[in-house]
Amino acid sequence: MSDWAQDYIPVNERIAQFIAKYPEGSLQPADPSQPYTVIEGKGESSWIVYTAAAYRHPGDDRPGIGCAWEPVPGKTPYTRGSELMVAETSAWGRAIAALGIATNRSVASAEEVRSASERTGRSQSVANGRAGTQTTPNTKTAQTRTQSAEEVPF
């Protein structure tokens, strides 16, 4: 197992740390009226984007913000059909990290590294606390469509 994998703190453990440190805190969509966005690229490529806010207390005017995206449909049996939940969990982990709750030296979640590796069809090395290359949505050709939670097409 790599040093990165041994040092990684899973999101569920960071959520527990967040709750212990901020008992009045909450994890919410950054914009509750638009909890996620679907970005559609050319062909069959599209991504679901989720932005989370980690509020330390009900009046927190500077919550930790985290954003994550996931390809739709998911590329693995573990992500297919769960794209929104995977993106949401990753965004929560990043929002918590933005408040200073440690993840490790990297900002990528274990699932993100695994997904990136599976998308490229090869193993990726971890160097300097970062995963290798990662495919991102082509924003020049992508169109953004916003949906409410009731309109989820998956």
Image: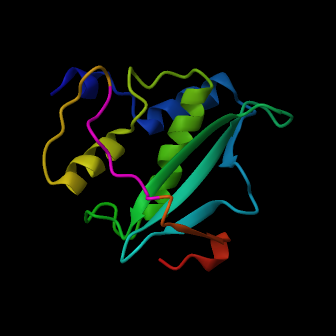
Count of numbered circles on the image: 0
Asked if residue 44 is positioned above or below residue 102 in the image, the reply reads below
| Residue at 57% across, 75% down | 152
Residue 71 position within the rendered picture, expressed as x and y whole percent measured from the top left: 39, 62
| Residue at 28% across, 48% down | 116
Judged left or right of residue 88, residue 122 is left
21 vs 154, nearest the viewer: 154
Query: Magenta includes 84?
Result: no
Residue 64 position within the rendered picture, expressed as x and y whole percent measured from the top left: 66, 33
Q: Which residues are magenta?
A: 130-138
Asked if residue 23 is positioned above or below residue 123 in the image, the reply reads above
Q: Quadrant of residue 55?
A: top right
| Residue at 73% across, 54% down | 31
Q: Quadrant of residue 138?
A: bottom left
Q: How is the image coloured?
A: rainbow
Judged left or right of residue 82, residue 51 is right
Judged left or right of residue 8, residue 145 is right
For the N terminus, the image quarter is top left
Residue 105 position within the rendered picture, expressed as x and y whole percent measured from the top left: 38, 20
153 vs 126, nearest the viewer: 126
Q: Residue furthest right?
A: 59
Q: Residue furthest front?
A: 140
Query: Magenta includes 136?
Result: yes
Judged left or right of residue 3, residue 91 is right
Q: Tell me which secondary structure the magenta stretch mostly adopts.
A: loop
| Residue at 53% across, 52% down | 88
120 vs 108, nearest the viewer: 120
